[in-house]
Image (cartoon, grey):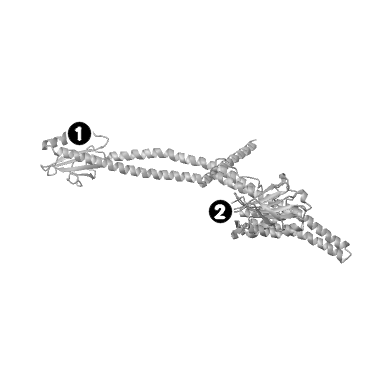
Amino acid sequence: MSASFGARSIRRAASRCCSAFAASGSCSVIRARLLRAGTFRLSLIFAGLYLLSGLALFAVITWRTTRFETARISAFIVTEADSIAQGSPEEVTWAVRTQFSHRPRGIYHNTILSALFAADGRLIAGNLGVVPGDLPADGEAHAIVRPVVSGAADDDAIIAVARRLPDGRLLVLGRGVGVLVSLEKIIAGALIFGAIPVIALALGTGFWISRRVQRRVRGVTQAIERVMQGAVHERLPVAGDADDLDQVSAGVNRMLAAIERLLGEVQGISNDIAHDLRNPLARVRTMLERGRNKAATTEEMGAILDRAIAGLDHAQSIITALLRIGEIESGRRRAGFQVVDLTAVAELAAELYAPLAEENRIGFTFAADDGASIPVFGDRELLTEAVVNLLDNAIKYTPPGGEVRLEVAVTAAGPVVRVVDNGPGIPAQERANVLTRFYRLEKSRGIKGNGLGLSIVLAIIELHGFGISLADARPGCVFEIRCRTPAGVALHPGARSTTVPGPAGRTGTLLEAGV
C-alpha cells in the first residue's frame, strides 16, 4: 500500500512539475512574443518618450522657477537694504537688532540673515558671525557660500547683499533660498505622480493591443498555412475594423480569389484540352490502325493519312490558340502600343473576309465614315486579329443567304467597331459564357472550330483596356468593341448618313459619321 501510494505521489509531483514547467515555458513564449510585437514596442517607445519629455519639462520648469525666485529674492533684499540704509545710525542698529532679525520666516525664505558690522569688522548686531569673504560690499545681491548663521538650516543656500553705510559700518542682509529645493521636490513629485499612471496605462494598452493583434495575426497565419496546404478556398479573417491588418487581409483575400479563379481556369483548361485533344488523337490512332490493318491500296492509305493529318491539325490549332492567348495575356505587347487608325484596321479585316463571305453566299457590308481616320491607341496587328476573329465567327455561323455587317463609328462614348449578323444568334442565358475558353453552343458542335476564337478577342480587348459587349440583333447577334481615343484627341460624333460600297460589292448604311 505504501509503495503504491509513493508511486502515485511521484506521478502527481512529476505532473505538477511538468505543468509548472509548461506554464513557465508558455509564459516565456508569450513574453518573447510580446517583446517582439510591434504594438508593444511602440508602447514602450511611447513610455520612454513620455519619460524623456517629463525630464525635459522638469528641467525647464526648475530653471524658470529658480530664475524667477532668485530674481524676486534679490530684488527684495536689495530694496530692504536701501530702506534700512536711509535711517539714522541708531535706526539702522535698532532695525537689525530688533525688527529685521525677528521677522517671521515666510514660504519664500527659510533663513533670514541680517548683521551690522563696525568698520573694523566687529559684529555690532545680527546673526552672522563674520563678514563673508566672497560677498562684495557693492549693494548688489550675490549668491554666497553658506556662512555660519545661528538658526540656519544646513541645506540653506544664501543670497545676500552688503552695503557700506556713510558712517563706515557694513550692513549685510540675506535670505535663504532653500525653498527652491522644496519647489524642485514638489515639481518632481508631481511629474512622477503623473508619469506612473500614464506609463502604466501605456504599457497596459500596449499589452492589450498586442495580445489582440497577436490573436488576429495567429488567425491570419493559420489561414495562410491552410492555403499553403492546398485549401485555396480559404480566406484570411477580417475583423471588420477597417484597420491596417483588415486592409492587408482584404487585399490578400482578393489575391486568393484571383488565384482560385485562375487555378479553376487552369484546371478547366486542362480538362478541356484533355477532352478536346483526346478525341482527335483517338480518331487519328484509330484511323492509322485501320489503315495498317485494312488499307489494301496506296490510295486508301493516302486517304486515311489525310484524315489523320486533319485531326492532328485540329489538335495543333487548339495548342496554338492557347499559346496565343497566353502571349496576349502576358502584356508584353503593350510596350509596342502606338496610335492606330481604327478605320484602316476594319478595312483590312473587311478585305480579308469579303471573299470568304462571298464564297459562302453570305452578303457582306462594310460601313464607315468616308475614309475618315479614327485614331486609337493600341497594337495594329492585335486589333486586326480581334476584328478578323469576330468576322470569322459571324460568317461561320450565318447560313447561306444571310447578312454580315462590319461597322466603324464614333459615338458619344468613343469609337466603336460592330460586327452584326442575322444568323441563329446566341440565347440570352448563354451570352455570358461565349467569351470563355472552349465554350461552344450545343447547336454549333458540328461546325468546325475549337472554341477559342472569342477568347482570343477578349484577351486582346482586355489588353487594350477596351470593352466588348454582345447584344441581340433580332435575328442574329451584335458584337461591339468599345475603344478609347488617345489623350488629347477629340472626336465629334455626327448623324450624317453615309453609304459606302462593301468589299464584296454590296452597300450598307451607317448612321454614324465624323464632323
Residue lying at 37% horizontally and 44% vertically, measured from the top left: 55
Relative placement, left or right, of 284 versus 137 is right
Residue 348 percent location from the top left of the image: 67, 60
Q: Earlier in the sequence, mark 2 or mark 1?
A: 1
Amino acid type shown at disc 2: Ala
Q: Which mark is residue 102?
A: 1
Q: Residues within 10 Å of mark 1 (few under 14, many from 20)?
A: few
Q: Which quadrant is home to the N terminus?
A: top right
Q: Look at the numbered disc 1 and give the secondary structure of its residue.
A: helix
Residue closest to the eye, 139 or 353? 353
Residue closest to the eye, 436 or 291? 436
Q: Residues within 10 Å of mark 2 (few under 14, many from 20)?
A: few
Residue closest to the eye, 444 or 234? 444
Relative placement, left or right, of 194 versus 149 is right
Q: Is residue 78 visible?
A: yes
Residue 162 percent location from the top left of the image: 18, 43
Camera-side mark, 2 or 1 = 2
State the CA–CA distance, disc 2 to disc 1.
Answer: 100 Å
Amino acid type shown at disc 1: His
Q: Which mark is residue 224?
A: none
Relative placement, left or right, of 447 versus 414 is right
Q: Is residue 451 visible?
A: no
Q: Look at the numbered disc 2 and give the secondary structure of its residue.
A: loop
Q: Which mark is residue 490?
A: 2
- Outermost residue on the bottom side: it is 298
Relative placement, left or right, of 191 versus 218 is left
Where is 189 relative to 346, above or below?
Answer: above
Residue 28 percent location from the top left of the image: 53, 44
Residue 176 position by quadrant: top left
